[in-house]
Amino acid sequence: MPISLATALWLSAAGARPCALAQPDDPLTIHLVSIAPGADLLNSMGHTVVVFSGGELGFPHAYNWGVFDTSQPGVVASFLQGRLEYFLLATHGQQMLDHYAREDRTMIAQRLALPPEQADAMFWRIDAQARSPELRTYAYHWADANCATKARDAIDQAAGGAVRAALDHRVDTTPRFEALRHFAPWPVLAFAWDFISSSRVDTPLTAWERTMVPEHLMLELEHVTVGWPDGGREPLVAETCTLHRGQRSWAAAAPRPGWASALPGIGGAALLLAARLRGGPGAQRLVGALVALYGSVLGLLGTTSFLLWASSDLDGVGPTENWLVAGPQSWLLAWSGVQILRGRAIPTWARAGCVALAALGSSTLLLELTSLSGQTNGRVLGALLPGLVACAAVVGHPPVMRPERRGAVTV
C-alpha cells in the first residue's frame, strides 16, 4: 500500500516516528489532533479530532464532532438560532489526515498517556456514541458544545476529571476577544458579531472554558497530569509534534486594533458635515442620501439583531447596549434623510427625535467609560456613534440652499 501524504508528513517530522500511529498489535494509542482554522467561516475557529490506533483496531479510527447535514432545512437560520444539529462521525484516520493536509492547514498531534483500562474505556464509549443515532447527535453551541469541548469532555471523563480540576482557574481573556481574533479575516462579520453580542461574552473565562477553542485545548492539555494505578501522576500529553505546517496556521494573537473600526465612522461623519457646510442643491441631495443610507443601516442592523435575540436559543446574542445606538428607532433618521433628499421640511418633532437618538446613543459612552454594563463595545461605538451624531446635527439644521446663478432666489 503506498504511503499516504499525511503519513509521510507524520513520519518525516523531527525525531524517529514522532507521534506515530500504532500498529494493530501495539497497545491502544490515542492522539488528539488540533487543526488550524481554514478558509471558510464555518472552520474559522479551527478543529479538533481524536484518533485511536493499535489495540484491536485494524486501521486508525478518527472521531470528529464537527459534522452537520447540509441538507437540513434552514441551515443558516438554525445555526443563528442555536438549533443546528451536529453529530459525531467516525472515519478512517488516515483519510482524515490526508484531507486536512490537502487543505494545507497546520496540524498538531498530541499523544495522550492514559492508563490502559481508561484508554480502552474511552475508545468504546466514543465508538458507541458514534454508532448510536440518538447519542451521536447534539445541538451545537459556540461555547459549550462544539468539536473541541466534546473532545475535551471525553478526555476529562477518561482521566477521572483531572482535566477540569487542572483548568479550574480564571484566565485573562473573554469570548469576545477570542471570537474577534478568529473572525479577523472577515471584518464585516467580526463587526456584526461584535454588535449583536451582549455583556455575556465579556465575562473572563476559566482555562477550562477557554478550551472551546481548539488551539487553547491543545495548549492547556500540556499542563494536565493524570493519576496512574501505582499512585503516581504522569503528564497527560506524552508527546507533541507537528504533522503538517501549512499556509493556514493559527489565528492572530489579538483582534484587529479598535481604531480600524472607527476610521470609516469618522470619515463618513466628516463627509456629511462637509456637504452640510457646502450648501446648495447638490449638497442637499448628498446630505439627504447619506442620512437616509446611514439611518437605514442603523435601523436594519439593530432591528435584525433584536429579532435574532428574540428568536435565538444562543446566550450572548443580546440584549446589548448597542441597541441604544442602532435599533428600530433609527428608522426615524432614515425617514428624515428621505425628507431632506426630496427637499421637504422636516417636522419639529422629527428633528427633536433625531437629536434624542444622538443623545441616547451617546449615553453608551458613559456606560463604556464607567463599565457600568460590563460590556466592551468601544469598536462598535467608534464605528457608529460619530455618524449618528453628525446625522442628528444635519437633520436639526438642514443644508442652507444657496441662490442659483440662474432662476429664482430661494429663501
Image: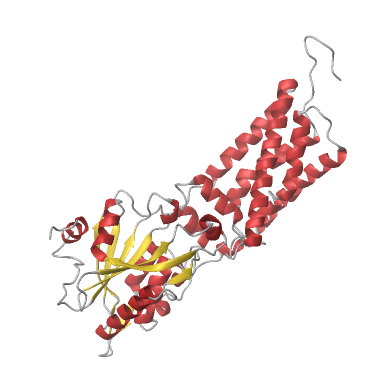
Q: Give the residue drawn at x 32%, y 70%.
A: 222
Q: In this rendering, does residue 292 appear at all?
A: yes
Q: Is residue 16 above or below residue 247?
A: below
Q: Is residue 52 above or below residue 359?
A: below
Q: Give the residue drawn at x 19%, y 57%.
A: 9
Q: Quadrant of residue 52 in the image?
A: bottom left
Q: Where is residue 92 drawn, in percent x and y? A: 26, 65
Q: Where is residue 216 drawn, in percent x and y? A: 39, 64
Dividing the image into 4 quarters, which one contains the C terminus?
top right
Dividing the image into 4 quarters, which one contains the N terminus?
bottom left
Q: Where is residue 59 drawn, in percent x and y? A: 21, 70
Q: Nearer the viewer, residue 199 or 132?
A: 132
For the rendered model, the colour scheme is: secondary structure
Q: Give the residue drawn at x 75%, y 21%.
A: 281
Q: Nearer the viewer, residue 61 or 183?
A: 61
Q: In this rendering, does residue 368 appear at all?
A: no
Decide if residue 171 is on the left or right side of residue 129. Answer: right
Decide if residue 258 is on the left or right side of residue 55. Answer: right
Decide if residue 104 is on the left or right side of residue 326. Answer: left
